Image: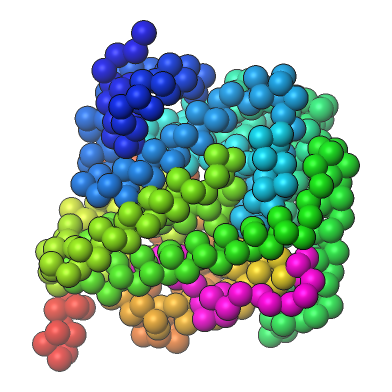
Amino acid sequence: MAGTAYEGFLELGEFEGRERQRILPQWVEAATRLGLDEADMEYAVTEFIPDMWDIKYQGVRKMIGAMTREAIDHTQLKEQKQRGVKLVYGVIPAILTPYQAIKKAGGDKIFVSFPDMCLMNFLQPLFHKGAPLFELAEQSGLTYGCRHCALNKLRIGLRLKDVVPAPDIQWSFGLVCDEATKVDEYINCIYDDKWFAVITRLPHDTCLGEVDDEIPERVSYLAAAFRDAYEEVQRVTGVQVRDEHIAAALDDFQRYLGKTDVLTRMNAEADPQPLRGSALVNFCHPFSMPFNTGIEYMEDALDTMIEEMKVEVENGRGIYPKGVPKVGSYFVPYAVPWVDKIFMDNGVATSSSLTMIPSAKQLIPPSGDDLYQNVAEQWLRMVFGMGCHVEVKTWIEKVERARPDALLMGFFDYDRWLGQMHKLGAREVEKATGVPTFYIEADFFDDRDYSQEALRTRIESISQVVKMRKAAKAQGG
């Protein structure tokens, strides 16, 4: 039934022995539903993944395995719904805690995930195969030239391809991205009147120097919004989310945050650097989406990667030569990992990601008596929860802590929030820290508008400048 390429992919993802044989038929069926054939498998296993990812590390391979489990789970949504499993979806930008609490409460009776984010993080980084789903949405109305978010297009494409059925309820966060919530309305009106969504909103970013998580009234407002959303989820699904579920989800988030801080710091401080940036940021997926299969597989991958990195650092080994310049970023574009590869080919390491380095405040667990208040406070401390001016201040804090040789911004030109913030924030970070900042106008998820050849010249120029500055600095210039 399956060719060796399908088995080879599972082997690459650390599926072994009986488990690999058990899951193989499910994987073949899942791949078919996602539009992947044996040629795609062969390309991924023999060329794309080895070229783009640091698969010599078991931690990276386990991470691929964790994403594969989640992708397989998503291709069985129709069958799960037929069995009576309640489907709860969400969209980014959000955080793990509210959705993880729902999963802890419902167990196998409920499916909780962000299908567009999960399958984007699988199809693009591992197969470079998101475009067919993007094009489905474009053909149906989300015009290519209007620069809509590829995540929203993927969500529509998955619905049109009948991979993702209507949820029992979709809980959307409109705290930052206003298009995601409108796309839910778009799907409901045009394609599927059973696509039901509730939306949590919070007006913020008044540009008056206010810090949202330090304003009690604002935290309380968001906590009340969470309560309202939970009540609606409970009404629709019949699953009761209790305090112990929220407390356990809060603990999961803070524990995972602390571990990614350890990994990020080790990678940023090591010379030579053990792990490329695009591989590093894949370990942060539980910040931006819940895992219906549980975060245990991702956490095991993270723990494994930390131990492997300790060994590499102790032995002075890395994937780059010693002394290469390090370029920090907002998010190394893991969905188009060839960007990282071109930097690597030009003798520059992409290093610490501003989204993965917790600020001092983010590492302090909320400790109030009201768990909904704690969730709200936790959200407002995260990068997507802050107002624009406050987030730029955390960028400065994180750059001063990591001290990269340069900072790369951009890849969010389609986003009305992050697009303008990167342009304005890059200038502020360079002014405050002295770290040279470069901006690339591009799309984080969808590279159809810019080819490797077109971007190579830009990256080569940035790399040359960074290397010259580092050499001059070493000579005291």
Q: Residue at x 56, y 53 (%)?
A: 288
Q: Position of residue 136 (x, y in %)?
A: 58, 25
Q: Which of the 4 image quarters holds residue 38?
A: top left
Quadrant in the rendering for residue 154: top right
Q: Is residue 10 magenta?
A: no
Above or below 228: residue 393: below
Start and end of the magenta stretch? 352-373
| Identity of the residue drawn at 57% across and 62% down | 253
Residue most toward the top?
1
> Relative to the observer, which residue lies in front, 111 or 53?
111
**Numbered label tally:** 0
Q: In this rendering, is residue 117 above or below 377?
A: above
Q: How is the image coloured?
A: rainbow
Residue 56 x %, y %: 21, 46
The answer to whether 257 appears left or right of 227 in the picture is left
Work out whether residue 280 or residue 72 is closer to the camera in this orientation and state it. Answer: 72
Between residues 150 and 215, which one lies in front from this camera angle? Answer: 215
Q: Is residue 411 visible?
A: no
The dominant secondary structure in magenta is loop
Quadrant including the C terminus: bottom left
Could you tell me which residue is drawn at 39 percent across and 55 percent down?
A: 302
Instruction: Give the position of the N terminus as an image quadrant.
Output: top left
State whether residue 287 appears in this view. Answer: yes
Query: Where residue 322 sits: x, y (%)?
Result: 12, 69
Residue at 72% of width from left, 47% of height from top? 105
